[in-house]
Every structure is written in structure tokens, then in C-alpha cells.
Amino acid sequence: MNRGLYTLLLHLAMPYAVARLWWRGRREPGYRRHIGERFGRYAGARDSRPLLWLHAVSVGEVRGAAPLVRALRSAYPQHAVLLTCTTAAGRETAQQLLGEAVRIAYFPYDLPWVVARFLDYFRPQMALVMETEVWPNVLAACRARGVPAVLANARLSEKSARGYRRLGALARSAFACFRAICAQDSESAKRLRALGADNVTITGNLKFDAEPDGAKLAEGRALKASLGGRRVLLLASTRDGEEKLLLDALGMFGTLSADTLLVLVPRHPQRFDEVAALVAGRGLALARRSRGEAPAAATALYLGDTMGEMALYYALADVAIIGGSFAPFGAQNLIEACALGVPVVIGPSSFNFPEVTRLACAEGAALQLRDAAEAASAASGLLADEARRAAMGEAGVRLCAAHRGATARHLEVIREALGETAQRA
């Protein structure tokens, strides 16, 4: 496929894209706000300072980007920072984590005239794209205007690489537009080079540098102290269908008992009510975080139906089962749990975090199991074995400490790619 055909198909898809925004806005009102930004229309005056632009598509990428944003503001204090997101949850997370430190907007649709409006308005000196967000028209426009683009914290699974290979010249030309690429690991670097990427450097994973919210940690620990010694099993960032699988499996092993509190945190906010109904339908005594309900002695399940509070939920946990890994979603981030000394149980699907999962299992910080039944059995065993939990938690903390430093390595690449332009601004 060439870029002309891609652009034509994207134009034809626009009515569907806008309708989908409105549809998703039924449960997530953020999708119905700031729609003009997606077409390159922005309210308010532009910041007069030179600007560094970073794109993070959703919640996970925003959290991963946070250490880099803070480092950029320190290294380039004379610059403004723009953070764009694609999802409403990503935008909300950016506001929670970074607040007024950055300007936050929606990413523009990848149409040439929309991209031109965006670049004319913000006039960024650099484009930093998190993980594997590769948009051909955006990248081509940046190169045409002399705006260096860097792919940050890049990861590329074999499945994603196959998808890009099917796009042929369109993908190769897009990857070639990057001035530099910071790959998380050697396998991602190898796949990126095979797709035509130049100047690939292995910098490690920015998520190892993320700092948990201290206030949320303290709140979580205080809540844990109020539970009277009950053990806590966290089902973290579960995806569609996984709650039923895991609740069924945990019931088989007797884990849902009076001395164990189950904390369930769905990955996507639009599913909070659906999951609450599922839990209530099983007759489990439920408390919901969003309603200010604290778990009582009779509470079987505490529903973490809030955004931006994973540090609180991990501070509560004795063991964490990581969602997204029991259906073919590739798993959610297990680094947060390891960094806070929480033993991890993860399912078979981990293609989003293959290297981290391998390292965590090899170091004894995590257990990867074949299905929900095995995971429930392992988690139940860990809840009963304090010494093993402590050993796994210590291994996780050591693992994360050993792999920090990606932010500093990213800054080195960014300085080289940016050259002297920012230094003179």
C-alpha cells in the first residue's frame, strides 16, 4: 500500500470514526469533548515558548511517559511540553499525573490537512512518539518540515511486526521517517530494523523509572491496616471476559473466603458498572471505591472502579494477578507490582511485556501459568505462604532497581536528535 491510497481510505473512514467517538461517549463522556482537536482545531492562545511534543495513546503509555516528561521539563526548562492522547482515559490520566505541567490535547487524525493544521498551530521542535504509534502522514509531515521524530520506549511484538510487514512500503517509509528509535529490548530492536528503521538504540523500558504516587501509597497502606489482618488478592487491570474466568477459578480453590479480601480493578472505566453487576449477580458482598465505600468485615470484593489509583491498590495487595493475560490481550503492566514488592501471577498471554515477564519469572518475582485455574491455585498457595511472598516481593524490587535508567538513556538520544536547535531556543 502507498500513502495516497492509505490517505483515501482514511478519508472514507472519517464518518465511521466520528460516529464511533459519539458512541463511545455514551459511557465515557470524554470522547464527546474536544472533538475539534482531532481535526486540528485548538482553543486558546498558543504558548510562545519553543515546544516539545510527546504522544502517548492511552493510559499505559501516559504512565510510561511520565518520567520522560519530567526529565524533559528539567533538561529543557525554556520549553513548553505538549502531551497528546488518543483515548479519553489517557487524557484523564495525563491530567491526574501531570496536571498543569504540560498542555494536554487529543492527537489529530492522520489526514494531511489535519496534520498541517496541528503543526501550524503548535510548531513543535521535536515529536516524541511512545511505544509503537506509527502514523504515516504525521511522520511524513514532520520530516518535510524538519521536525525530528523519535520513537520512544519502542516495543514491537512478532504479531505487530507481521501486521506492519503486510503494509509493505507504507510501513517501511513511515519507520524510515524517525530520526532515532529507543527500543525497549534487543528483540524489538531487531524487528524494527527489519521494517526499515534506522538509528535504533536499546535504551530499556521507561516504565521501570516510573515513581508511584506517594499519597496513594500511604492511603492504600492505611486502608490495608484497617482490614484486621485479612489477606488481599488483587486482580489488576482485568479485561473483558477475564473477571468471570478468574472468579470461577478462585471459587474452585476456596480463595473467596472470609479471611481474604478480593480487590478487582477493571482496565477500562466503561466496564466498571458491567463488572459490578457481574459481582453482584454472584451474591458477593461488594464495596465500590468510586462511591467512597470502604471494605467492611463482611465485604468479599472491593471494586476498584476509579482511575489513577493503581498505587493504592498495589499497596493493599499481598498477591497480584495481572489482567489482560488470560485472554489474547498480551497482558497489562506488571512492573508496578514488582516495584512495590507484590508477588505477581500472570497468565499465558504476555506479548505486550515479553521481556519483563521473562525477567520477572527468571528472577523469582512472578509466576506465569497456563490458565485461570492454575493462576487461582498458585495465588491461593501464595496467600497461605508468607515466606514465599516475601521472597518474591524482594526479587521484584531488586529486578526493578537493576533495570532503571531508561529515562537518562532516552535523554541522550533526544539531545543528539534535537541537535543544537533546542539549545539555542
Image (spheres, grey):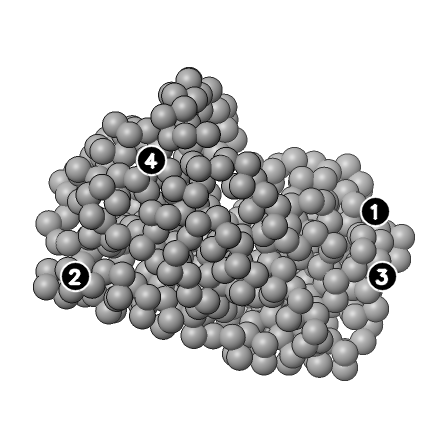
Which residue is denoted by mark 3 in the rendering? 377
Whether tag 2 and tag 3 are in contact, CB under 8 A, the answer is no
Residue 212 appears in the picture as rendered: no
Q: Tell me what residue is drawn at x 43 percent, y 74 percent.
A: 405
Q: What element carries label 2?
A: helix
Relative to residue 412, is residue 329 drawn left or right?
A: right
Q: What element carries label 1?
A: helix
Q: Which of marks 1 and 2 is nearer the N terminus?
A: 1
Q: Tell me what residue is drawn at x 30 percent, y 63 percent.
A: 414
Which residue is denoted by mark 4 in the rendering? 137
In the foreground, 314 or 112: 112
Q: Earlier in the sequence, mark 1 or mark 4?
A: 4
Which numbered circle lies on residue 248? 1
Between disc 4 and disc 2, the foreground one is 4
Q: Which of marks 1 and 3 is nearer the N terminus?
A: 1
Q: How crowded is mark 2: few (under 14 residues within 10 Å), some or many (20 or more)?
A: some
Above or below, 375 against 214 in this view is above
- Disc 2 residue type? Ala
User: Alpha carbon of mark 4 to alpha carbon of mark 2: how far?
Assistant: 24 Å
Q: Which of marks 4 and 2 is nearer the N terminus?
A: 4
Residue 81 appears in the picture as rendered: yes
What percent of the width, then of the height, locates residue 264?
66, 52
Q: Is mark 4 on a helix, strand or loop?
A: helix
Q: Tell me what residue is drawn at x 67 percent, y 67 percent.
A: 358
Relative to residue 245, is residue 210 drawn left or right?
A: left
Which residue is denoted by mark 2 in the rendering? 422
User: Alpha carbon of mark 2 to alpha carbon of mark 3: how far?
Assistant: 55 Å
